[in-house]
């Protein structure tokens, strides 16, 4: 009897009004978090593990709806490394080429534009709006327009080049390296190592730059606005010139913004897909088949789900290593004021 | 000198749009003849407005809803985008508020977990996510989520970016305001919807606008999880027209592109202040 009495009495002493309120608040809080977390768990966390399972499934094709059971093994991973087409290695090379050229080009141009816009000029708002326009345009539509600009026959870009006496080029349809094209035009030829990125790749890079420079410029502008003006005045009194101001004050104090943008654009180039797929479908041949395109094509066109998942894990691991190294190197140069 | 560089940049930014607009009102014959320049005069022929209805007709006809396919694509894009924007705003407001203003055990661990999802690249999860679309049963009919609006909408109803941005904003609201609201008899729900949200309009608008642009722009996923042309969104429809007959009909292709791009640009001109604010305060991109 006594034990029963304490069992009844205890809750009333344990659940004080304050405790009750805190428990209710926590419950309501979890309820608030639930919708977002449910979606993220199902569509972000769980797929990582599920994908690992699929990548180990050696017979995984389109028929999974019929409850086909898996034969587990490492065949998909083995294939990625031993396939005679060497498509995995090639896609990695294409991705890195794309990234290594377009990131500095984009950020360099954006820095120049932001620095110019930051001077006291008239019509700043208009320039900013115009530079930003390519970024908000639906990518598929602008890529389609550019595909016509690049057209080898009746394309506006070739029209401009031939008008000033240059040769008409095949642009998106040209798998040869840019240096090789120049060499051949001058009657020579280059070894494979020195042929440079394919012209199709260069055309894609030009498009990417066109899309993202305005976006990078806006972020650089915000970064420039955060540098205290007194620093410039003090340096000017000490007799620093324009270039010195830029080199000694702007660049170091802008480095957190630069680092952040670098991270963002590198990730952006690694996951680039829409415009590449619209403009070249990864071609000609496999000249512009980046990692992202390869994974997609193996799944979408050949329904090789297991192989595609295996590719995504291998390529992700390699790209992660590259990104970490790059961050270490770039991060050590950031100056925090 | 400064103006020369900036103006050159602005011209390069704008020329593709000029080319698109001028080409969309030229005849096929005039383009074949080499009349390519993107400025006035457009050539010897009158302006070919008829290219627009021609393009709409050539894209195809949706028998299911008895309308030209172009309008079906547009309606699909609007349905998907609105659903995602409303859904993301709601889940982000609730979660952002819980993280910023509520006392929840384990909150910090959950927040770290949330930020960790940013690290998961889309290419890593796209295969299993596509497979899941074949496997999830459709509660509204037979079959799976594949080739339905569910596949286009549900996976995108939560956004780490949205939660993060709103949390940062809600944290700036002083705790005293909540205590005052409690004295007036309000709980968390009423406080959030009556007081916090009206105060947070700029942040909310930024989240909604950026998600609008990202969803409207999405192409890879809709291409992957839809099969029938009447389930396509505008971006997929445009690409399919390009690889089909649009690939040679430059003038129709440009008319199609114009119809896709112009509404977005007009929308942007009216809202551009919020865009730049949203981007510069967070710097994040989805």
Image (cartoon, grey):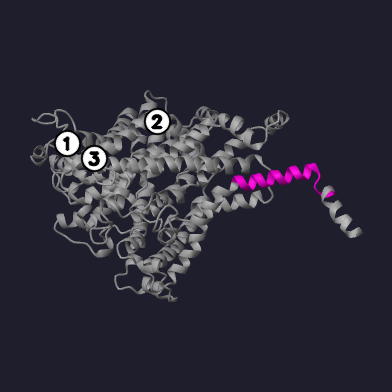
Q: Which residue is mark 3?
A: B256
Find numbered disc 1 in the image and state the secondary structure of the residue it sits on. Answer: helix
Quick check: is B85 in the magenta stretch? no
Give the position of the C terminus of chain A as an image quadrant.
top right
Q: Are marks 2 and 3 on the same chain?
A: no
Q: Chain of mark 3?
A: B
Magenta highlight range: A13-32
Q: Is residue B131 left or right of residue B31?
A: right
Q: Are marks 3 and 1 on the same chain?
A: yes
**Residue A74's spot in the image, x, y percent?**
43, 75
Marks 2 and 3, Cα distance to the nearest angstrom?
34 Å
For label 1, the crowd category at 10 Å Cα-Cα, with few meaning under 14, some 14 to 19 and many 20 or more, is: many
Q: Is residue B54 left or right of residue B160?
A: left
Q: How would you classify the magenta stretch by its main secondary structure? A: helix
Q: Which residue is mark 1?
A: B51
Q: Chain of mark 1?
A: B
């Amino acid at each position: 009897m006594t034990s029963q009495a304490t069992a009844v009495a205890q809750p009333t002493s344990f659940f004080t009004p304050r405790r009750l309120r805190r428990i209710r608040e926590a419950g309501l809080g979890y309820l608030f978090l639930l919708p977002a977390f449910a979606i993220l768990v199902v569509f972000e966390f769980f797929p990582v593990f599920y994908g690992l399972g699929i990548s180990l499934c050696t017979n995984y094709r389109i028929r999974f709806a019929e409850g086909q059971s898996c034969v587990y093994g490492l065949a998909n991973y083995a294939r990625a490394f031993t396939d005679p087409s060497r498509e995995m290695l090639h896609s990695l090379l294409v991705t890195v080429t794309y990234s290594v050229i377009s990131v500095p080009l984009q950020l360099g141009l954006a820095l120049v534009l932001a620095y110019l816009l930051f001077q006291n000029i008239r019509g700043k708002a208009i320039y900013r709006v115009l530079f930003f326009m390519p970024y908000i345009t639906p990518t598929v539509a602008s890529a389609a327009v550019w595909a016509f600009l690049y057209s080898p026959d009746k394309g506006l870009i070739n029209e401009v080049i031939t008008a000033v006496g240059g040769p008409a080029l095949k642009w998106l349809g040209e798998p040869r390296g840019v240096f090789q094209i120049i060499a051949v035009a001058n009657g020579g030829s280059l070894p494979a190592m020195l042929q440079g990125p394919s012209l199709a790749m260069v055309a894609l890079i030009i498009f990417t730059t066109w899309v993202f420079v305005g976006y990078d410029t806006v972020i650089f502008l915000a970064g420039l606005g955060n540098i205290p003006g007194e620093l410039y005045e003090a340096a000017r009194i000490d007799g620093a010139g324009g270039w010195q101001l830029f080199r000694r004050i702007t660049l170091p104090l802008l480095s957190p913004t630069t680092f952040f943008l670098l991270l963002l654009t590198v990730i952006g180039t690694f996951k680039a897909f829409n415009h590449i797929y619209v403009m070249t479908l990864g071609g000609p041949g496999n000249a512009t088949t980046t990692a992202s395109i390869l994974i997609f094509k193996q799944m979408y066109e050949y329904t090789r789900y297991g192989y595609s998942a295996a590719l995504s894990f291998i390529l992700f691991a390699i790209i992660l290593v590259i990104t970490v190294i790059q961050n270490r190197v770039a991060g050590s140069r950031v100056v925090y004021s | 000198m400064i103006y020369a560089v900036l103006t050159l940049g602005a011209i390069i930014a704008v020329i593709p749009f000029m080319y698109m607009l001028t080409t969309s009102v030229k005849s096929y014959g005039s383009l074949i003849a080499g009349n390519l320049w993107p400025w006035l005069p457009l050539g010897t022929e009158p302006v070919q407005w008829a290219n627009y209805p021609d393009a709409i007709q050539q894209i195809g006809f949706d028998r299911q809803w008895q309308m030209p396919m172009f309008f079906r694509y547009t309606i699909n894009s609007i349905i998907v985008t609105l659903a995602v924007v409303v859904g993301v705003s709601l889940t982000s407001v609730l979660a952002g508020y819980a993280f910023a203003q509520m006392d929840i055990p384990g909150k910090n661990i959950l927040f770290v977990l949330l930020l960790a999802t940013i690290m998961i690249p889309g290419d890593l999860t796209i295969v299993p996510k596509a497979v899941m679309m074949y496997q999830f049963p459709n509660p509204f009919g037979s079959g799976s989520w594949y080739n339905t609006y569910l596949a286009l909408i549900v996976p995108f109803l939560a956004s780490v970016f949205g939660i993060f941005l709103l949390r940062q904003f809600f944290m700036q609201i002083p705790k005293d305001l909540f205590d005052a609201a409690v004295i007036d008899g309000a709980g968390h729900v009423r406080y959030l919807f009556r007081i916090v949200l009206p105060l947070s309009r700029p942040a909310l608008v930024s989240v909604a606008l950026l998600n609008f642009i990202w969803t409207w722009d999405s192409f890879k996923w809709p291409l992957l999880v839809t099969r029938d042309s009447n389930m396509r969104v505008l971006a997929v429809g445009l690409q399919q027209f390009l690889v089909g007959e649009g690939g040679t009909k430059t003038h129709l292709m440009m008319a199609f592109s114009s119809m896709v791009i112009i509404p977005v640009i007009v929308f942007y001109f009216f809202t551009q202040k919020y865009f730049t604010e949203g981007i510069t305060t967070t710097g994040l991109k989805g």
